[in-house]
Amino acid sequence: MSILQTHSCHSSYNRLKYVFNEPAHSYRKTTKRVLAASGFNIKMLHDNDGKISATQNGAYLERQFRTVLKRAHNPRRCYQAQTIIISFDPTEFDTSDLKAQSQQALRLVQHYVRKHFADCQSVIAIQSDGEGGKLHAHVVMNTIKPNGKTVATNRFNINKLRKDFDREMKTNYQRITGRQWTNPVHNQTERKDIHNLTTKSEWQHQLKELINQIKAKVDNITDFLKQLEQHSITVTERQKGKAWTYHQIVSTKTGTREMKVRDFYQRIDKETGEIKSTRGLGQSFSKSEIERYFNRKKENEKEKQNYDRRENDGLEKVKTMAADARARARQQRRINEVAEQQLKEAIDEEKRKAVEQKTRLLNQEQRQARGTKRVSRQATKPKRESRPKQPRRSKEIEGPER
């Protein structure tokens, strides 16, 4: 079984531009965005040899979509296009010869669209530029038929699309490729307890446990859906993408059976508002609650990062304050050492001055003591008699003797 997805698009221009006019998302298998193209009820560009070109102009195709859209009762309708994505399993197309296999895949999809959507305006593009390198097809359909009537949305029911395309592969795969088609779903790894799931309630219980385990391991809804797919559980959208339905094909004692269950559903009386019945796994397994769970998880992770950053900032601040305190302590020690040195020098200076003062006083006392002794000796010494002074003889100079 090839994996199918379906989406409602608000803008046919954006979708056609995305499919045809963007560069290749990955060069793992090819450098081309589109390997082969075709369409129904629409004019497309051709090569010189008359074949439809793989290179198309999204704006040119969108103008034709818009011309048909104007025929609708409401040309300003919310959804302008519907897309179907068909992803082939590697066992169906191993991409060893992209040129030949892309043409084979295009023929299969053309036959399928012609059989089930021949009355719609559509464009088909075969690509292999994804990260995984798988061969896949984009089918973009106008929500308005060429006659102006609206395409019924129930024609895009995912279960119906898958069953119809499985029948297409079973009928035409061998005729187109020359190889026998074996549904890849039968080759999927079975769960160890698959034979014990004899009732739907047991399967739902196991499914709840698995969902809770995956929710705890991953951080976003994209990884959540990928993990479910690895466990052979597919999720389809309903209520225009607001709700989910879980699917799994299991092998029981009575044979292979597809199990499916809604995420959460309540039947409410429109007049009284009374809840008549509740179905599904539970409100905590609904799309909105799971999205809210991952949003809270993301916010908690962000808050934790902010807390760790604040803790680190606080730690850095503490380290800075400690470094400042150590610097202040070192500076204070240096100030104290200088003060102690100055105090010691002042004390030494005071001591020196005191010694000098003491020495001066002692010397002064000694001088005073010597002076007192001298005076006392002079007082006690007998006085000598004074001799009369003789007149001083002097030569008179009277001139030379004659």
Image (cartoon, rainbow, N blue to C red):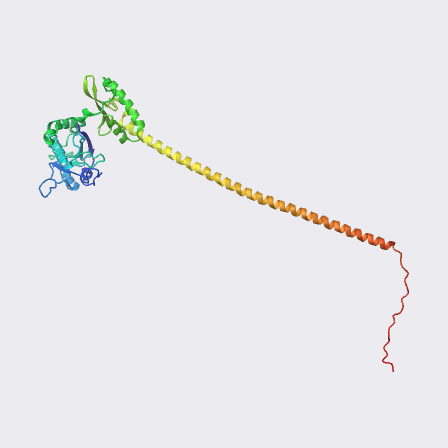
- Specify the quadrant of the image occupied by residue 139: top left
Q: Between 236 and 371, which is closer to the camera in this rendering?
A: 371
The picture places residue 147, in percent across and down from the top left corner, at: 11, 34
Residue lying at 31% horizontally and 28% vertically, measured from the top left: 217
Q: Quadrant of the N terminus?
A: top left
The picture places residue 223, in percent across and down from the top left corner, at: 27, 30
Q: Is residue 349 left or right of residue 378?
A: left
Residue lying at 59% horizontally and 44% vertically, measured from the top left: 339
Q: Does the image show residue 70?
A: no
The picture places residue 115, in percent across and down from the top left corner, at: 10, 30
Q: Would you place residue 348 above or below residue 114 in this image? A: below
The picture places residue 352, in percent across and down from the top left corner, at: 67, 48
- Specify the quadrant of the image occupied by residue 306: top left
- Specify the quadrant of the image occupied by residue 242: top left
Q: Between 335 and 298, which is closer to the camera in this rendering?
A: 335
Q: Between 187 and 273, which is closer to the camera in this rendering?
A: 187
- Count of picture labels: 0
Q: Would you place residue 164 above or below residue 100 in this image? A: above
Q: Residue furthest left?
A: 50
Q: Between 127 and 294, which is closer to the camera in this rendering?
A: 127
